[in-house]
C-alpha cells in the first residue's frame, strides 16, 4: 500500500493538533506492505490513518486466530482434564489440584482477566471477535455453558461445543442481554470503536461488565522498537488505545472505567525482535510456530519474561485489560 495523505483528526476524540505519524509494515504474513498510523496529540490513541477498504483479505485462511481448532490445541483427554482442573480453579478459586496446576503453568491471560470479576458458571458471556473460539472452549471445558462467540471474519459458523455457537455476525446483530461481554484481543480490530462500545453497553444486564483486553499505548515496547513493535500488527490493528482514549470512549458510551490491569507477555519482546530482523510471525523459524528453530535461547526468553513482569507492575506493558460497567445515574 502506498502511503497517502495523513488523516487530520483523531477518530476517538476529534483532535487535530500535534498528531504524530508512524509507519508500520505488515509482518504477520510478511508481505511488507506499508501503512501510515497517527498518534493523537491529545488522547494518545494510535490509529491507522486510512482503514483499507479490503480489510478482510488480511484475515485470510492463514490467520492463526481464525483457523486453529481449540479442541486440537487442547490436546489429549488427559491434557483436557488437567486444563479443566486448572482453569476451573483460576475462574472460581476452588480445587487444590487446580491450584497446583496453576502454579506449574498459569492459565491463559484471558481467563485470568475474566477471573477478576468472579464470574458465576451460570453467567451469560458473549465474546466479541471470538476467532477460532479457544477462549470460549476453555470456559466450556471449565464448566461454563451460557456462551456465544461472534466474529465477522469467521470462515464459517459452527457449534464449538454442545450449545456453544460461533456466529459470523457483528455485535449489532445480537439482541440478547449479557452478564459479561468480552473483547479479547479484538477491540483493536474494530473500525468504529465508539458505536461498538455503545452497542455493548446497551446489551449489558444492570450489573454486567465489559472486559476489553487490548494492546495499549504508551508502553515500553513501542518506545523501544518503534516501527518494529509487534503489537502494531498493521493493518489489522486499527485503533490501539491509551487510558485517556479508553476513558473518552467509555464516557461517550455511558460507561465507567472501573479498573485497569496490565497483563502483557513476553510476546512484546520476541515478536518485536523478530520483526526488527525481518522474520514474520508466521515464518517457519518464528518462535510463534517453532521455538526450537527460532533465534532465541531459553535464557533470552526467561529474560523477556522477567522484564515483562516488571513492566506490568509499573504499568508499562504493551497490553492491558479494561473493566467497564454502566455509569450509574448521577455518575
Image (tube, grey):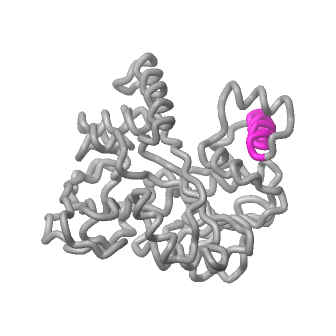
Image coords of residue 62 (percent x, y): 43, 53
Residue 151, located in which quarter of the rendered image? bottom right
Q: Is residue 125 left or right of residue 96?
A: left
Q: Residue at x 77, y 26 (%)?
A: 100
- Residue 289: tell me if it is visible: no
Q: Nearer the viewer, residue 4 or 205?
A: 205
Residue 226 at least partly seen: yes
Residue 61 percent across, percent down from the top left: 45, 58
Specify the quadrant of the image occupied by residue 145: bottom right
In the rendered view, would you say 46 is above or below 98? below
**What residue is at 51 percent from the left and 70 percent from the top?**
250
Examine the image and state in which quarter residue 39 appears.
bottom left
Query: Magenta stretch: dominant SS?
Result: helix
In the depicted view, which residue is nearer to us: 226 or 86? 226
- Residue 267 locus on image (x, y percent): 43, 38
Q: Residue at x 79, y 39 (%)?
A: 89
Q: Which residues are magenta?
A: 77-91
Picture coordinates of residue 105 (x, y %)?
66, 29
Amino acid at each position: 500500500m502506498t502511503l497517502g495523505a495523513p488523516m487530520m483528526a483523531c477518530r476517538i476524540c476529534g483532535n487535530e493538533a500535534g498528531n504524530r505519524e508512524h509507519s508500520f509494515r505488515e509482518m504477520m504474513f510478511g508481505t511488507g506492505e506499508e501503512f501510515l498510523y497517527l498518534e493523537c496529540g491529545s488522547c494518545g490513541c494510535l490509529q491507522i490513518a486510512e482503514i483499507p477498504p479490503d480489510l478482510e483479505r488480511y484475515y485470510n485462511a492463514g490467520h492463526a486466530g481464525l483457523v486453529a481448532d481449540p479442541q486440537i490445541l487442547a490436546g489429549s483427554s488427559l491434557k483436557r482434564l488437567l486444563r479443566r482442573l486448572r482453569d476451573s480453579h483460576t475462574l472460581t478459586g476452588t480445587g487444590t489440584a487446580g491450584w497446583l496446576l496453576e502454579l506449574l503453568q498459569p492459565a491463559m491471560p484471558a481467563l485470568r482477566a475474566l477471573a477478576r470479576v468472579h464470574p458465576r458458571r451460570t453467567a451469560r458471556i458473549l465474546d466479541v471477535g471470538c476467532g477460532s473460539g479457544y477462549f470460549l472452549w476453555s470456559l466450556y471445558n471449565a464448566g461454563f455453558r451460557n456462551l456465544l462467540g461472534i466474529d465477522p471474519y469467521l470462515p464459517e459458523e459452527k457449534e464449538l461445543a454442545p450449545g456453544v455457537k460461533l456466529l459470523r455476525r457483528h455485535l449489532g446483530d445480537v439482541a440478547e442481554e449479557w452478564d459479561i461481554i468480552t473483547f479479547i484481543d479484538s477491540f483493536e480490530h474494530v473500525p468504529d470503536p465508539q458505536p461498538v462500545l455503545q452497542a455493548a453497553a446497551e446489551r449489558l444486564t444492570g450489573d454486567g461488565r465489559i472486559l476489553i483486553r487490548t494492546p495499549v499505548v504508551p508502553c515500553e515496547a513501542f518506545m523501544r522498537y518503534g516501527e518494529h513493535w509487534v503489537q502494531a500488527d498493521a493493518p489489522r490493528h486499527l485503533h490501539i488505545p491509551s487510558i485517556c482514549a479508553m476513558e473518552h470512549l467509555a464516557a461517550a458510551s455511558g460507561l465507567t472505567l472501573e479498573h485497569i490491569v496490565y497483563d502483557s507477555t513476553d510476546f512484546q519482546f520476541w515478536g518485536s525482535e523478530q520483526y526488527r530482523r525481518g522474520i514474520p510471525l508466521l515464518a517457519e523459524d518464528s518462535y510463534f510456530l517453532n521455538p526450537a528453530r527460532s533465534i532465541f535461547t531459553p535464557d533470552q526468553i526467561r529474560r523477556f519474561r522477567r522484564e515483562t513482569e516488571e513492566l506490568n507492575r509499573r504499568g508499562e506493558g504493551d497490553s492491558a485489560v479494561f473493566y467497564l460497567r454502566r455509569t450509574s445515574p448521577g455518575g
